[in-house]
Amino acid sequence: MVEHSAIVLTPGRAPWQIEPSVNQPTKQQVPTDALATEPVSERTASWWMFYRLLLAVLFLGVANFWGCSSPNGFLKCANFIRTDALPRPEGPEGVKAANPAVLIAPIPYDEFEESPWVIEPDVRVHLVFELGLGNCAYMSRGLGRVLQKEGVPYTVVWIMDREQTRAGAGHTVVECPIQLGETRTIGLIDMLEGGVPEVDGRAINVTDLIRHESMPRARIRSFNDHKDERSIYYGPLLEDSVIGVTTGEDMNRYFDFLKWTYFDVGYPRIEKLIYNVGGMVFGVFPPVYITPSEARRFDSWFVFEIAIARTMIWTTRILLVMLVFDGCLWTGRWLWGRLRASKLKVLQSA
């Protein structure tokens, strides 16, 4: 049975002059509830964006967990670069030189159970030089900040031995122009040992380290009453180590980055993990340069650790790029939906 629309005949009008029923709409009605309903595709995009954010946070969390137990080991495995020749801190004639005696003598070395986690550069200098706190890497970075302010070129040198690097140990020193009495040379300053390592009265430099030969006659010219002339880091340890270098320029750039972006959240450990791992993700954390021969040795020792560390960093970078893309896409869809809804409302009210 076919249903017909109701027709109202008005007296005085011809049959073909039909008046529509009051129940028959005169214009297209658009339900307002439909305008507020989010499209399924938009909801799906929002969920995908949430999942990718969750994955990015998860990968950073894994990186931070590893960094929490072995920060230096993670940073070295994820952030080294091959180079044909290690950078050296040689500057033009007349460049300033560091005076180890003046720098090291006043430090009140303290026996510490754990190195401080504070990363703000000037606070680090205070902890190192006025309180005597920090391990070799922490104190070397503190010295780097001082040399940056004094305009002395330098490099941070990493002695990464096979057994201890996985756990974030090893040894760290600074190479720079140094003034030893009347003698000026390029040598190492060992902040943890409180002096300058020497062999037969000559200051040791990076060239001596990369030979990977034990130096049984090595001694520390100590400039601090709390330290002696002995050190375990220039003996057999060198035979099974990889030598890496971070340039002063890279380190200074990172110090400046911290100075301008540092925000105190009240938890130094969390701050260090965020800035160090986040700095690696965004490419501002200073890398460690090693020669190809050293890299082959390093790769053979830490195949699994390097693969995991670099996978976490690059996966986090990709997820963050996808997250930005999803955010732009979601914003575009949201704006287009609002614009379309406003147009429909205008047509409905016309």
Image: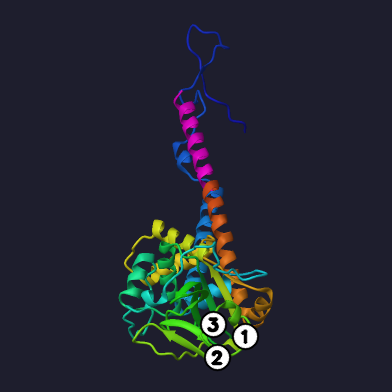
Magenta segment: does it hold 152?
no
Q: Residue at x 36, y 70 (%)?
A: 125
| Tag 2 and tag 1, C-beta contact below 8 Å | no
Can you give x and y, in whole percent of width and height, for residue 209 in the image? 58, 82
Residue bearing mark 3: 165
Q: CA distance from mark 2 to mark 1?
A: 9 Å
Label 2–label 3 contact, CB within 8 A: no
At mark 2, the secondary structure is loop
Residue 96 location (% of width, % of height): 46, 65
| Magenta region, residue range | 330-350
Q: Element under label 3?
A: helix
Task: Look at the image and tell me whether residue 168 can be seen.
Answer: no
Do we see residue 300 in this rendering? yes
- The x, y position of residue 107, in whole percent, is 33, 78
Q: Is residue 132 left or right of residue 205?
A: left
Q: CA distance from mark 1 to mark 3?
A: 16 Å
Give the residue number, with chain letter if any, for mark 2: 235
Where residue 317 sits, quadrant-wise, is bottom right
What residue type is disc 2 on? Gly
